Image (cartoon, helix red, strand yellow):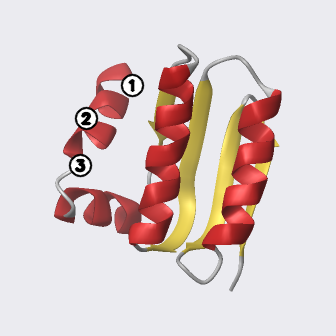
Amino acid sequence: MSVRIEQQEGRFVVEGEMTIYNASELKDQLMAHLIQRHDPIALDLSGVTEIDTAGLQLVLMARRLCAASARKFVLQDPSATVRETIMLCGLDQLILSEDAQS
């Protein structure tokens, strides 16, 4: 399965596998969306079926890009797979900051 990203109702929805096998494709898509916008970014990862460190790096890159331009970044509705990977990597603040805003 590949990965796709699309804009829906003011958020970016990622579906599929966020792995090293498609990280380059996803990075290009994500960067194109992020560069065009100047408002807060909500990244919906509810449809992510698999994520590895390459996918996690993309999430961190998006967060860093938003911070550099003083935009709010929200990780919205991460799938169980995404939550588990985030917790295993000790990046709980990605989830906790999202939960605090719910």
Pinpoint residue 87: horizontal percent, then vertical percent: 21, 57
Q: Are marks 2 and 1 in contact (CB under 8 Å)?
A: no
**Is 10 displayed left or right of 92 in the figure?**
right
The amino acid pointed to by label 3 is Leu
**Is 5 displayed left or right of 41 in the figure?**
right
Question: Which comes sooner in the sequence, label 2 or label 1?
Answer: 2
Q: Is residue 36 above or below residue 20?
A: above
Q: Is residue 52 visible from the viewing direction of this image?
A: yes
**Is 73 displayed left or right of 27 in the figure?**
left
What residue sits 24% from the left and 37% below the top?
A: 93
Q: Residue furthest top?
A: 70
Pinpoint residue 86: horizontal percent, then vertical percent: 29, 57
Q: Marks 1 and 3, how far apart in space? A: 18 Å
Secondary structure of residue under mark 1: loop
Q: Is residue 77 visible from the viewing direction of this image?
A: no
The amino acid pointed to by label 2 is Leu
Secondary structure of residue under mark 2: helix
Q: Is residue 86 above or below residue 34?
A: below
Provide the residue designation for mark 1: 102
Q: Is residue 42 above or below residue 85?
A: above
Indicate which label's residue lies in the foreground, 1 or 3: 3
Question: Which comes sooner in the sequence, label 2 or label 3?
Answer: 3
Pinpoint residue 29: horizontal percent, then vertical percent: 77, 55
Pinpoint residue 95: horizontal percent, then vertical percent: 31, 41
Q: Is residue 70 above or below residue 96?
A: above
What residue sits 54% from the left and 53% below the top?
A: 45
Q: Residue furthest front?
A: 68
Provide the residue designation for mark 3: 91
Few, some or many residues within 10 Å of mark 1 (<14, 14–19, 20+): few
Residue 96: assigned label: 2
